[in-house]
Amino acid sequence: MIKKRIMLCSAATIILCSACGGGKNQIKQTEESTTVAMVIDETLTASVKKTTTAASEGSKEAETSKESTGSKASNATRTEFKLTEKNKSFLQELCLYLPEFTNPYNLDRSFWHDFLFLSYTSKSGNQYELVTVDRKDLGSKETQVKVSKAEVQAYVKSVLGFDMPTYEPTVKERQAGQASMYYQDGYYYIGVSDFGDTMYTYKSTEIQKDDTISVIYQITDPKGGDKGTVEFLLLSETNENGFVVTAKMVKQKSQ
């Protein structure tokens, strides 16, 4: 800026002297004025280029820093997540309890029926209250697990990460010969049954590029035969489990 001001003052002085000195000096002074103006123009152009280059380099550095910070945060997410033995046991149970799904925003009544039924049908009297009711369609009595609506809602949220929509099937909706699964006066009643001898064994955990966590379990039959795999997709969450399930896929091995 100091250089620019000195040159501008020199140009003004030359023009004034030219006006006082008369005709012989006019052409000479005009040429000098033009030369000074060209020097000023070149100086300003160089200054603008320098400023633009510095701004561009600064922008690139800021962008690089931003990308580096984002990459570090993503890497931190990937390295921090780890399944505990308790987590693995919980997911092993969900191999049995949780129906297949790929879109948590599109779960129908059939999904909720199966999820709640499978989650509680094998519970014992040491864990929940059991009641016995007459079943004329079965020609016998049926033992049912009695679970409060509040507990079911808390369980669903711990697994899926959102509140269960209203699902209150009536006893009239139960098909003849089918195990019970209905809601009445604040409680769900689920007919007692058991599962087969299929085994689910933890196989692997992989954190994907979008921070989705893939957990795979091996399915084996009672004789140890390979029956395929169950894959869960998880998202890290600040809840009791440390994650929520966003999808479950079963790949049966062809015979």
Image (tube, helix red, strand yellow):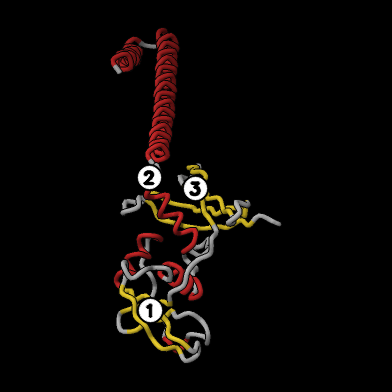
In the figure, is residue 141 to the left or right of 248?
left
> Residue sitting at 38 percent across and 68 percent down?
123
Question: Which one is earlier in the sequence, the residue at label 2 or at label 1?
Answer: 2
Residue 157: image quadrant is bottom left
Image quarter of residue 83: top left
Question: What residue did someone put label 3 on?
Answer: 202
Name the residue that disc number 1 marks.
Answer: 189
Residue 99 at least partly seen: yes
Image quarter hosting the N terminus = top left
Q: Which mark is residue 84?
A: 2
Q: Nearer the viewer, residue 110 or 73?
A: 110
Q: Amino acid at mark 1?
A: Tyr
- Badge 3 crowding class, 10 Å Cα cut-off, few under 14, some 14 to 19, many 20 or more, is some
Q: Mark 3–mark 2 contact, CB under 8 Å?
A: no
Residue 240 place in picture, x, y as percent: 31, 54
- Residue 108 location in percent, x, y? 50, 73
